[in-house]
Amino acid sequence: MIISNVNFVDPVTETINNCDIKIDLGRITAFAAAGSLKDDGDGFIDATGLCASPSFCDIHSHFRDPGFTYKEDILSGAECAKRGGYTDIILMANTNPAVDNAETLLYIQNRCLETGIHVQTCGSVTKGLKGEELTDMADLKARGAVGFTDDGIPLMDEILLEKAMEICKSLDVPISLHEEDKNLIKESGVNTGEASAHYGIGGAPREAEYKLVARDIELAKKTGVRLDVQHVSCKETVELVRKARKAGFKNIYAEATPHHISMTETALFEYGSNAKMNPPLRTEEDRQAIIEGIKDGTISFIATDHAPHSKEEKDRPLLKAPSGILGLETAFSIGYEFLVESGAIKLPKLIRLLTLEPRQFYNMKCPAVGVNDPADLVIFDIKAKWRFTKSKSKSFNTPLKDRVMHGKIKYTLCGGKIVYEEI
């Protein structure tokens, strides 16, 4: 295949170069001068006016399989990923049963082989996600678990968590933590502030997040584990991570979601439960602090927290509806609009957040940045506008439904094969 006259965005050098790309047997065989490679009949994409980069990597997705396949399954989740430009996905372990045993892990791995992209899973930190007893993390890692998390459920036992961190450190795998102290939360998914006042409830205060983050940063400093502070939602958390990294603790990382970059708690008033997530959307000051954290390198990656729920579940009254929204199909567009078009960062920086940084966190090599690299690529149009009217997911729980999006994925390639093409 030849991709002709494309603007290649290199996340390593953070440069954009107009070029041709030649692919053979699933690998990049040449980056050539724009227009120099001619159609040889084996596959040709005229990418004039388009951009390309390594395909995206999401380190925080829920494909709900096993146990909740009416919401999503591994195959439908992978189709969302392809449409969003992703070929590497790291799944969370809060399935049913949880990924706390070899049988469930093998089931997921075998299903992932059917997707046409690279989907891997974390194991759970504790058995049954109960926060009481550690899993056999060494065995799960040996069988292919790429990290550990009880995402969706905070780990409240400090002694247990420190032991888990020590094991993860010894295994050279990361631990990803959902940071919400449940003892401080009256109603989850709704910020304590304007939103909770609107609904006449107590809500989920920011202290529930940043106080637990403060504890866990100290544990990560002590153990040296690679820590992912998941889905940062408030300014205090950003500052805690900033101070730790500035002090030289580069093993401490944080992720931001597209929804926390683009929305505030007032979205609940318009979209109801489709804008309900844990941790909740907070204030404009928090949103801006997260963006500032992205700008200065405090926040290392954009992670979608793709969390499908059925329409029936989301149609329940707000406090009874589950938290979470879709994320994979719209992450690039939201990042482009609210980070690049807003002037916060340049396009190569956004691509770095979506490609290089998340892969490095999991000790994965970024594809498609040099000759002989796997041809895992995404081709996109930054000038295109499109309306999000349908999803590849089994669910459609998102406040972005019918919204005009900025920047469109045109092709996703995995191993040189087109796995998604916008018709």
Image (cartoon, rainbow, N blue to C red):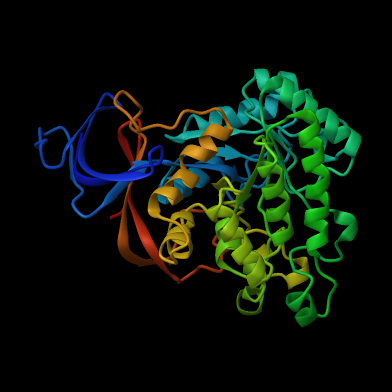
> Looking at the image, is 160 positioned above or below residue 184?
above
Whether residue 325 is visible here, answered yes or no, is no
Horizontal side of 122 relative to 401 (left or right) equals right
Residue at x 62%, y 65% (from the top left corner)? 287
Residue at x 74%, y 58% (from the top left corner)? 236
* Residue sitting nearer the eye, 373 or 129: 373
Image position, residue 303 (x, y; %): 57, 48
> Looking at the image, is 5 positioned above or below residue 1?
below
In which quadrant will I find the C terminus?
Answer: bottom left
- The quarter holding residue 43 reads top left
* Residue sitting nearer the eye, 258 or 45: 258
- Spot the residue most to the front: 247
> Looking at the image, is 234 positioned above or below residue 202?
above
Image position, residue 125 (x, y; %): 77, 33
Image position, residue 355 (x, y; %): 46, 41
Q: Count every numbered label the image shows and give the total.
A: 0
In which quadrant will I find the N terminus?
Answer: top left
Residue at x 90%, y 56% (from the top left corner)? 183
- The quarter holding residue 205 reads bottom right
Image position, residue 361 (x, y; %): 58, 34
Residue at x 61%, y 79% (from the top left corner)? 270
Whether residue 190 is visible here, answered yes or no, is yes
